[in-house]
């Protein structure tokens, strides 16, 4: 689910490029303030699959659920102003539960590189859980506020295999569309 969020963040960072610091000889970066959030709206297929398997999805604080989806607060972000490579960090996460089985995915990081993805802390490991597709993203900018909508998130093979093993199923597959992400962020003030 979260993987789709990464491309939205990438688009938002690109739109914020004019806010990058301008130092000679230094790498120019765009920093995101710890404000805003990435919201993931589950696809009908993903929601139906979870329900048919008896798996409940719930936000882990400070993330929260709303009418528009699961909302994960942005805590920081730093990207290269030229290439936009970098990371966007989030607080909270999501818990997937069925009976006594519980899988917690926390502290998402959107990695903006050649293959944008979203990683999560699962136990003591960091795992790539979503691939992000920015090809259909829509970007709007107002002052330092940037919104990127329409980022598609699909399940990685690693995440699909882990979920299948945890819940004793074969229902999760690589490329399963999890939903659409919207990033609403703000560039940090230059000092």
Image: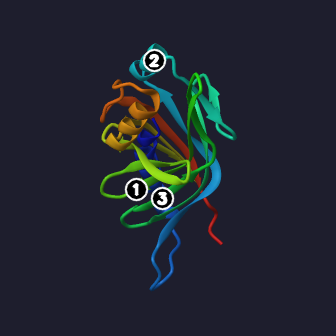
SS under mark 3: strand
Mark 1 in CB contact with mark 3 (< 8 angstroms): yes
59 lies left or right of 167: right
* Residue corresponding to mark 3: 87
Q: How many residues crowd around disc 2 within 10 Å: few (fewer than 14), some, or many (20 or more)?
A: few
Q: Earlier in the sequence, mark 3 or mark 2?
A: 2
* Residue corresponding to mark 1: 112
Q: Earlier in the sequence, mark 1 or mark 3?
A: 3
Spatial CA distance of label 1 from label 3 is 6 Å
Against 118, residue 18 (above or below) is below
What residue appears at the point 44 percent right and 16 percent down from the top-left corner?
48
For the residue pair 52 and 75, the one nearer the viewer reads as 52
Quick check: can you spot residue 163? yes
Q: Nearer the viewer, mark 2 or mark 1?
A: 2
* Residue corresponding to mark 2: 53
SS under mark 1: strand
Spatial CA distance of label 2 from label 1 is 32 Å
Quick check: can you spot residue 143? no
State the quadrant of the N terminus.
top left
Q: Nearer the viewer, mark 3 or mark 2?
A: 2
């Amino acid at each position: 689910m979260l993987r789709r969020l990464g491309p939205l963040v990438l688009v938002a960072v690109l739109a914020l490029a004019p806010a990058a610091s301008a130092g000679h000889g230094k790498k120019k970066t765009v920093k995101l303030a710890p404000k805003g959030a990435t919201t993931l709206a589950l696809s009908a297929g993903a929601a139906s699959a979870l329900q048919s398997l008896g798996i409940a999805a719930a936000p882990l604080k400070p993330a929260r659920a709303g009418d528009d989806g699961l909302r994960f607060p942005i805590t920081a972000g730093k990207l290269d102003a030229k290439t936009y490579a970098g990371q966007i960090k989030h607080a909270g996460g999501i818990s997937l539960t069925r009976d006594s089985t519980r899988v917690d995915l926390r502290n998402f990081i959107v990695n903006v590189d050649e293959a944008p993805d979203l990683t999560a802390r699962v136990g003591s490991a960091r795992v790539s859980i979503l691939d992000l597709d920015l090809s259909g993203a829509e970007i709007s900018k107002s002052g330092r506020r940037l919104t990127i909508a329409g980022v598609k998130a699909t399940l990685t093979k690693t995440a699909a295999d882990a979920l299948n093993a945890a819940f004793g199923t074969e229902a999760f597959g690589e490329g399963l569309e999890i939903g659409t992400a919207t990033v609403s962020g703000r560039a940090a003030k230059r000092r």
